[in-house]
Amino acid sequence: MASIRSQFKDIGDLKVARLIAFSNCYLSLPVVTIFIFVVSSFSTNLVAKSNPLPTFQWNKRILILVTPNTGNKKYVKQIEMIKNKLLGIKDRDIIVIKIIDQKLLGVSKEQSREGDVLEILNLYNLNGNKFSILLIGKDGDEKVRSINPLSMCIFFDLIDSMPMRKNEILERGKNVKC
């Protein structure tokens, strides 16, 4: 603005100079808008890539089981507990995803991409060589983590205490107890 003042001596000319400066800012607005759009699109892609299971967010709760092999005693025990509570799992919109020997099971090819196993293991800080179980809420946040099998009642009680689940119970008019 100081350089503009030096060029224009009287008040009328200063008003013109301010108008020109404003016009220049206004004309650059589309450029700024395009820049913001490009940057936000880029950052949205980064967020989408950081979540390997985006199709489930806000629709499903995810129970992730990780084991080096299907013979792992902890894994076998957890699978048995899951099989005994299938109605409660369905009622709570839980999808069970297994990572066995670095392979992803329980997710269709349309819902997964190459490299998802490593992304899931890294994102949730899981070791593919040891048993672990992890519950991810519909909001995408981690709710429970354990290196030992857990009763499905522990998961159900936690889920049933959440506001989103309480709304589901009211809307559906039912709740499969543990």
Image (tube, grey):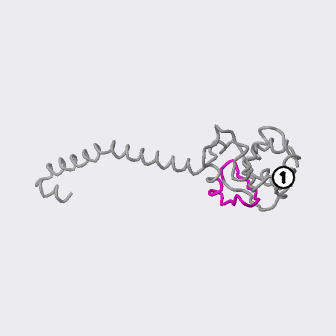
Specify the quadrant that holds the N terminus. Answer: bottom left
Q: Is 172 one of the magenta-colored residues?
A: no
Residue occupying image coordinates x 69% and y 39% = 108
Where residue 12 appears, as percent x and y from the top left, is 14, 49
**Other residues around mark 1 within 10 Å, as few (<14) / some (14–19) / many (≥20):** some
The disc labelled 1 sits on which kind of residue? Answer: Met
Identify the residue under disc 1.
152
Please name whichever residue, 19 or 74, is drawn nearer the observer in this view of the structure: 74
Q: How many marks do you count on the picture?
A: 1
Where residue 42 appears, as percent x and y from the top left, is 46, 47
Where residue 65 appears, as percent x and y from the top left, is 75, 53
Please name whichever residue, 129 or 131, is drawn nearer the observer in this view of the structure: 129
Disc 1, SS: helix
Q: Is 129 one of the magenta-colored residues?
A: yes
- Left or right side of 15 for 25: right
| Vertical order, 122 against 32 (above or below) | below
The stretch in magenta equals 120-140
Residue occupying image coordinates x 78% and y 53% = 161
| Vertical order, 26 against 133 (above or below) | above
